[in-house]
Structures are given as C-alpha cells and as structure tokens.
Image (cartoon, helix red, strand yellow):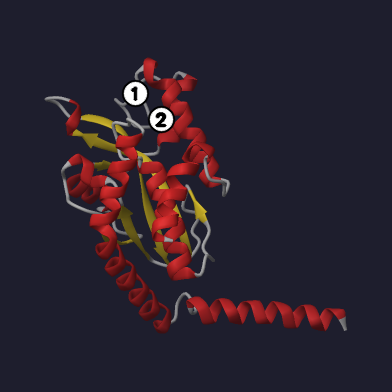
Amino acid sequence: MIGVLMMMLLLSIALNIVFQFGHPNSPSSHIDDAKIIAHIEQYLDSISPSLIAEVQSLAKDRSLPSWGCGASSYALAQILNKKFFGGTLIIKAAYDNSPHIIVERFGFVDDPTTGPTSVMVDHAWLQIYFDDQFLFIDPTIAQFGKVQGIAHHVFRVDDPDISSDLQQKYGIHDLRIRKLVRKMITGVPSDQEPYPGLIIPPDQMNYYFRVVLDRDDVEEGKMPKNWADWVKTLIDKYG
C-alpha cells in the first residue's frame, strides 16, 4: 500500500512539473516559454526607470561608486522568480544544464567612468534559462553608458557569439571571476590559461576574495549577508 501511495505521489509531482513548464521537447513548452519571456521583458521595461533611480539612490546613500550589481541582480532574480514562476526556480551562480534555472553570473565589464582609459571591473547580471535559450538581464549596466535602463536580450544556449555579443553591446566580459581568482592564488603565470594576459592587481585581491565569497553564497542558495538591506529595499518595492 505504501509503495502504491509513493508511486501516486511521484506521478503527481511529475504531472505538476509538466503542467507548469511543459515537456522540455514539446512545442507547447517552447510556446509557453516565449510567452513568459515576453511578459518578463514587458515588465522589465515598465519598471526600468524607477528601478534605475532606486539603485542609484541606494548607491548614493551608501557612498558607493557603483550601483550594487550583485545585490541588485540578486534582488531582481527573487522578484522575477516570485512574479513569473511562483518562486519555484533555483537561483545559482553557475549553469548546471537544468531546463529552467536562474543564474546570477559573476564576470567583468569595461568601466569607462574611471578615467581616460576603460578599466575592467567585476560585474554581475542574470541569465534565466528556458531549455535551449536564456534571457540575459542586466539591471545595472546603464551606469557604464552603453545602454539606458535595464538591458535584456534572448540568446540560444548554443549560440557561439554570446560572449562577443555581450562585449560588443554591453562591454561585458563573459569570464568567471572565480577562475581568475584561483589562477592568482595558485600562481599560474599570467600568460597561461585561464584567461591569458589577465591578472588581478595584488592590492585588489582582498576585494575579489569577498566577491568570490558572495558568488559562492549564491551558488549554495544563500543570500550574501552584506546584501541584505539592499535586497530587502528592492523586494519591498517591486516584490
């Protein structure tokens, strides 16, 4: 009897997943995904001016030089997860081939605001995966002057031009901070893989250690403690 009940429970869960997301290879799944993506993009456009003003205000109140890309992206991930997925998606820092997942990416971006020459600095953004495509979302990229408002764009997962498109359109370097920090720690020569020619200045290593710790918290399903107030402010307003 217990075995029968367990089988019924597992069948119920499976049907619920299919009902909610559709079978990953079925035409209806792709149609539903397209509708959800369109609704998310409409929502992002509707809140863009307000959210940009809010993160600018948060940065000014805390005397920060940037718009809090990590905390802002994490807060937006929570908001979108609740509004469009009923809070069912996992938020991580690395893509694990799950058909539906929200990934907060930790990479780099060209910052032209630091002086006559652009400097590559750490940056975070979102990628929401829908089977064979993902919706790129960057709520704070406007601070670097490439675009205005919240950036969003749909990519196919197997698109070979993702990295070059991100760099050309948004100044984003689709690299992994964790890999570069590990390279520095282990003493790999700068001209070798990963990322030949790239280094982190020694006087910035402590800062990048903290970025990696924040990244690892997200990967483990936890919100970094130092983001709490920022995230709460945005969720209270938009969640």
Q: For the C terminus, which image quadrant?
A: bottom left
Point 41% across, 67% down: residue: 130
Where residue 108 appears, as percent x and y from the top left, is 31, 37
Spot occupied by residue 89 in the image (x, y as percentages of width and height): 51, 63
Residue 182 visible in the displayed image:
no
Q: Which residue is mark 2?
A: 180
Tell me if residue 32 comes above or below residue 235 in the rendering: below
Residue 64 place in picture, x, y as percent: 32, 31
Q: Secondary structure at mark 2?
A: helix
Residue pushed farthest top?
Answer: 203
- Image height check: is 50 above or below 42? above
- Residue 166 in the figure: left or right of residue 101: left
Disc 1 crowd rating (10 Å Cα; few below 14, some 14-19, many 20+) is some
Quarter of the figure that contains the N terminus: bottom right
Left or right: residue 209 compared with residue 152: right
Q: Which residue is mark 1?
A: 199
**Residue at mark 1 to residue at mark 2: CA–CA distance:** 7 Å
Residue 152 numbered tag: none
Q: Mark 1: which amino acid?
A: Ile
Residue found farthest to the right:
1
154 vs 59, nearest the viewer? 59
Left or right of 73 in this view: 141: left
Quarter of the image for residue 196 reads: top left
Determine whether label 1 and label 2 are within 8 Å by CB. yes
The amino acid type found where label 2 is placed reads: Leu
Question: Which label's residue is closer to the chain start, 1 or 2?
Answer: 2
* Disc 2: CA contacts within 10 A as few (<14), some (14-19) or many (>=20): many
